[in-house]
Image (tube, rainbow, N blue to C red):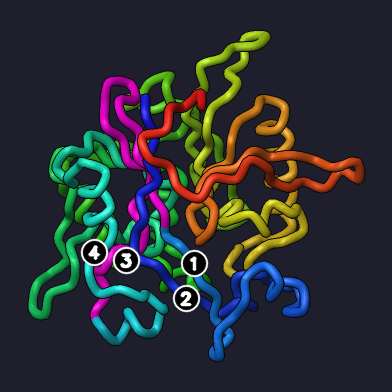
Amino acid sequence: MRLWSITGNSQKLDGGAMYGNAPRGMWERWSPPDEANRIALACRALLASPLAGKTVLFEAGIGAFFEPKLRERYGVQESRHVLLDSLRAAGFAHEDIDVVVLSHLHFDHAGGLLAAWEEGSPPRLLFPNATYVVGKAHWERARHPHPRDRASFIPELAGLLEASGRLELVDGPHSRALGQAVRFHYSDGHTPGLMLAEIVGPERVGGQAHGGVVFCADLIPGRPWVHVPITMGYDRNAELLIDEKRDFLADKLARNVHLYFTHDPGCALARVVRDERGRYGTANEVAELHARALAA
């Protein structure tokens, strides 16, 4: 099996919102802001093939579905559908994808499922041959959003996914589409039912899988957020997220599972480490993956 980091449309968002209650004097060293106080963010997907005999895309980024006014409001930097270009550069088309795994349905993670905006055209799903895998608990949130995060969902998307006939809702550690090859972890601190997909590694120690890769989604958007106290203003429950992140990192460190970041503009993959004071960090950082073997 090989892995590719698939770049989607990039985004700029307010640095204070992305770093919650961390002071600017701290976070600006990690993410230098522009004149509007916005920081650069990636919307990176992960492609794995063959995985359980299939070509699998983990997330789809923000895409290009926004009309120009909203594209400017939410800091989307490109008008074209960058994800499709990146797939082509890796040797794939969106029609080649057998499974799309979605950690959650906020627009910066699922907007890439839709074709680029065209005036007068309704939203249209891409990936016509793919099963869309979504966590059941989060699906309920997307169908009945809270006022706090209603604007984070694409109103038409849930209906389009359901009408496709290719939606699989998951409420346990495995899905029908991917079987034992992918293990799901769950988190509620950012949004209810956030689903974190771990590509199971080739090693087994004491009956447990070691050496895999986990898609960290918005539990850990990038390297700065590996530091346990750092959360986002967008998180629904910062204290819960911190507790979940501490347990998550301890598990991945113990099992040598690498972290895959969606929003870090400079790093796709890293190994989690912990120093003598118990602080988590990263090592062996990789900016891009090009047909990288899982065990490499």
Residue 48 falls inside the magenta stretch: yes
Region in magenta: 44-67
Task: Choose the circle earlier in sequence order: 1 or 2.
Answer: 2
Residue to which mark 1 is pinned: 41
Residue to which mark 3 is pinned: 154
Task: Choose the circle earlier in sequence order: 4 or 3.
Answer: 4
Task: Choose the circle earlier in sequence order: 2 or 4.
Answer: 2
Which image quadrant for residue 61?
Answer: bottom left
Q: Alpha carbon of mark 4 to alpha carbon of mark 1: how far?
A: 16 Å
Residue 192 visible to the viewer: no
Q: Alpha carbon of mark 4 to alpha carbon of mark 3: how far?
A: 17 Å
Q: Alpha carbon of mark 2 to alpha carbon of mark 4: how far?
A: 16 Å
Residue to which mark 4 is pinned: 81
Q: Residues within 10 Å of mark 1 (few under 14, many from 20)?
A: many
Q: Amino acid at mark 3?
A: Ile
Q: Amino acid at mark 1?
A: Leu
